[in-house]
Image (cartoon, grey):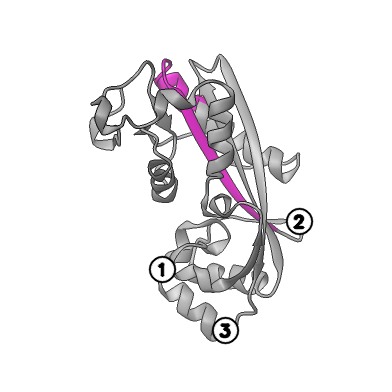
């Protein structure tokens, strides 16, 4: 079993555990807010994007690698993974490697509409059953002046986020409009993930137990 130090499980485990194959604090917080109990295990899978395929296919392929890598270690678990990509004018923007690269990304997105795509994969048990889906949200940025960009880059927040920004927190001022799932832009389309778990009869297994049941 995963180390308990990484667990957010609050009650007795029913059947197989749910594992989030990501150390993203945003994904962890969103699943907690959705009332799920789960363990966190970082995936060491290759995150190199495939050369061919649509934006949605690429995100799902990388998410699938993450899920399968963790599933091999914990074959009785249900593993959830995700990969988020930011795309503008056919160019995929990853996590900036420096403040200068973050400034370039934000200047590119300024005043424009881009796509945020999260592919997620759920596999259980031992990879015998797997479902992958992708959700796309259109995000329109405000027109940013150089001072705005410099201020946001100096917060340090862009460096661990695809596209160089996060819609939550101080990055909220960057965005003038979104069309689609808000949580998808944060890194996990929560409604679609829950709907998929429900569709396959998995959701009730991983819901937090109420106080009356403990």
Judge from the rendering whether residue 210 lies leftward or rightward of residue 58; answer left or right: left
Does the magenta segment cover residue 177? Answer: no
Element marked by disc 1: loop
Residue 168, disc: none
Element marked by disc 3: helix
Q: What residue do we see at 76% from left, 61% from top?
A: 89
- Compared with 148, 188 (above or below) is above
Can residue 96 be seen by looking at this rendering? yes
Viewport quadrant of the N terminus: top left
Viewport quadrant of the C terminus: top left
Which is more N-terminal, label 2 or label 3? Answer: 2
Task: Work out how far the residue at label 1 is from the one at label 2, CA to CA, in angstroms.
Answer: 26 Å
- Compared with 36, 174 (above or below) is below
Task: Work out how far the residue at label 3 is from the one at label 2, CA to CA, in angstroms.
Answer: 24 Å
Judge from the rendering whether residue 26 lies leftward or rightward of residue 54; answer left or right: left
Which residue is denoted by mark 1 in the rendering?
Answer: 156
Element marked by disc 2: loop
Which is more N-terminal, label 2 or label 1? Answer: 2
Number of numbered tags placed on the structure image:
3
Query: Counting other residues with Cα less than 10 Å from the Cα at mark 2, is it few (<14), some (14-19), or many (20 or more)?
Result: few
Query: Counting other residues with Cα less than 10 Å from the Cα at mark 1, is it few (<14), some (14-19), or many (20 or more)?
Result: some
- Region rendered in magenta: 68-87
State the image coordinates of residue 14 (x, y, percent, origin top left): 34, 19
């Amino acid at each position: 079993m995963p180390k308990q130090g990484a667990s957010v499980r609050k009650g007795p485990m029913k059947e197989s555990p749910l594992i989030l194959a990501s150390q993203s604090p945003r994904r962890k917080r969103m699943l907690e807010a959705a009332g799920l109990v789960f363990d966190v295990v970082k995936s060491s899978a290759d995150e190199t994007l495939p050369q061919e395929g649509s934006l949605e296919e690429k995100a799902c392929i990388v998410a699938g690698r993450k899920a399968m890598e963790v599933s091999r270690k914990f074959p009785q678990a249900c593993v959830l993974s995700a990969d988020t990509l930011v795309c503008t004018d056919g160019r995929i923007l990853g996590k900036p490697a420096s403040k200068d690269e973050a400034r370039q990304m934000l200047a590119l997105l300024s005043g424009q509409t881009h796509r945020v795509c999260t592919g997620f994969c759920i596999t259980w048990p031992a990879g015998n059953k797997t479902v992958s889906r992708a959700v796309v949200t259109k995000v329109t940025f405000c027109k940013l002046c150089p001072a705005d960009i410099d201020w946001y880059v100096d917060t340090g927040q862009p460096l661990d986020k695809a596209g160089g920004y996060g819609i939550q927190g101080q990055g909220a001022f960057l965005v003038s409009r979104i069309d689609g799932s808000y949580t998808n832009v944060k890194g996990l389309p929560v409604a679609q993930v829950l709907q998929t778990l429900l569709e396959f009869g998995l959701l009730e297994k991983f819901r937090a137990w109420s106080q009356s049941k403990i």
